[in-house]
Structures are given as structure tokens and as C-alpha cells.
Image (cartoon, coloured by chain):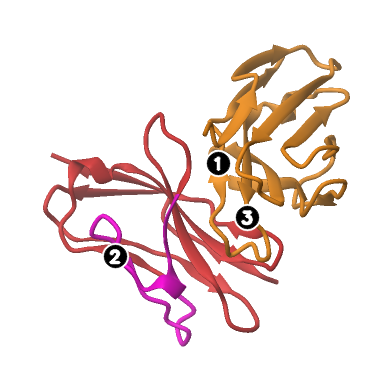
Chain colours: A orange, B red
Amino acid sequence: NAGVTQTPKFRVLKTGQSMTLLCAQDMNHEYMYWYRQDPGMGLRLIHYSVGEGTTAKGEVPDGYNVSRLKKQNFLLGLESAAPSQTSVYFCASSYGGTAGDTQYFGPGTRLTVL
Amino acid sequence: AQRVTQPEKLLSVFKGAPVELKCNYSYSGSPELFWYVQYSRQRLQLLLRHISRESIKGFTADLNKGETSFHLKKPFAQEEDSAMYYCALNQGDKIIFGKGTRLHILP
């Protein structure tokens, strides 16, 4: 039981390049989330999903897109990377019903945009 | 607006001394609050939630609706408590996190 996994662990991009971060969970969770973690800013929600085929905007959605085609996967895309998107990205999932359920986090992806 | 405030970015405490990490919230209605912790080189994980009224690793947190606070406390700090701590508030289908407090236990 791997829990929540994230691919890749590290990535360096040039400004304007695109990439996709993959989050996978094997706990049959309904809810999935993408956060970014920046020094002094804490965790900020980018996008989230309350079930397969659904997505919703979080606190800082601009410059990102997401897709949840399969229940176990939640993809985060950067179409045209900017230096302001340099951050550590965390994916999380929860059972659902209410966000009061425990969120389980992935190990994070460290992204640097030059 | 609903928000979570952690006023301290860094808290340094000597080993064996009491710890109090502050969290204040703004929410209309009955709040559901959590503390999450991130140890060095580990994943962010749930530490405790107020509805459980539990003590985890010696930590407790009491919801004070009058002061709109959910401070995290431990009577005697241990070196392994050094970590980043986030207070979080349930918003229905998502959670909002505070900016976090880094707890540094001094030997």
C-alpha cells in the first residue's frame, strides 16, 4: 500500500516550458488536492477534486490546470512555467464525505523555474 | 472571511520546557480544526483534530470559541518535536492552512 505518490520528485524548467505533475493514490479516496508550499506562505490550495471527473479552483489557481480522469490520479499541469511557480508542490487525498477526513500527503515535488 | 492565523513563524523552546503554538481562526459557525505536522524529510501528516479530544505524542489542543483559538500545547518539549506545525480549518470540501510555525527544540 503505497499511499500517495508523486512524480517527479525534482524538476528544473526554463521559463515558458510546460510540464505535468502526477499524483496517484491507492486508498480509493474520493477527494484529491494540489498545494504549493512557499517559505512564509504556508500551504496554499491550487486546485482540488471531489471525485472522478470533477475539479475546482482553490486559493491560487492561476497558471495551473488539473485533470482527474481516473479516481486514483490527479494531474497538475503548468502550461507556461514562470519563476513565480518555483515551489514545492504537495498532493493530498482524503476519503471524502467531508474534508474533515484526514488528508494524506505525498512526498512533494520540488520545482525550480529558471 | 474565513482564515487561520499562526502569529509565530519560529518558536524556539528548550528541551523539557512547555510548548504552546498559537492558532487563531475566523469562521462563522461551528469550526472544525486540525493540527498537521511536518518533520524533517517526512510527509505532512495529521497530528490531531479537535473533535477527537485526543492527546497525540503528548500534544493537546483545546478549542476556545470565545477567543477563537486552537492553541497546541505540550507540557515538556522533546527534541523530536522539532518540526513545522500547521493549524488548519475545515471549509467543507477543502481545508485552509495557516502559514505554519517552525518549532525548534533547543538542547
Q: Amino acid at mark 1?
A: Phe
Write the residue at 82% across / 40% down.
A68
Please give the residue where the numbered disc 3 appears in the rendered image. A95
Does the magenta stretch mainly form a helix, a strand or a loop?
A: loop
Write the residue at 81% across / 23% down.
A81
Check the image and report above or below for A52 versus A26. below
Please give the residue where the numbered disc 2 appears in the rendered image. B55
Which part of the image, by quadrant, shows the N terminus of chain B? bottom right
For mark 2, name the chain.
Answer: B
Q: Is residue A26 magenta?
A: no
Check the image and report above or below for A66 versus B76. above
Q: Secondary structure at mark 1?
A: strand
Could you confirm whether marks 2 and 3 are on the same chain? no
Please state the extent of the stretch shown in magenta in the rendering: B46-69
Q: Position of residue A94 (x, y in %)?
A: 62, 52
- Mark drawn on residue A105: 1
| Residues marked 1 and 3 touching at CB (< 8 Å) | no
Q: Secondary structure at mark 2?
A: loop
Q: Secondary structure at mark 3?
A: loop
Write the residue at 67% across / 67% down.
B91
Q: Could you say which quadrant of the image residue B17 lies in?
A: bottom left
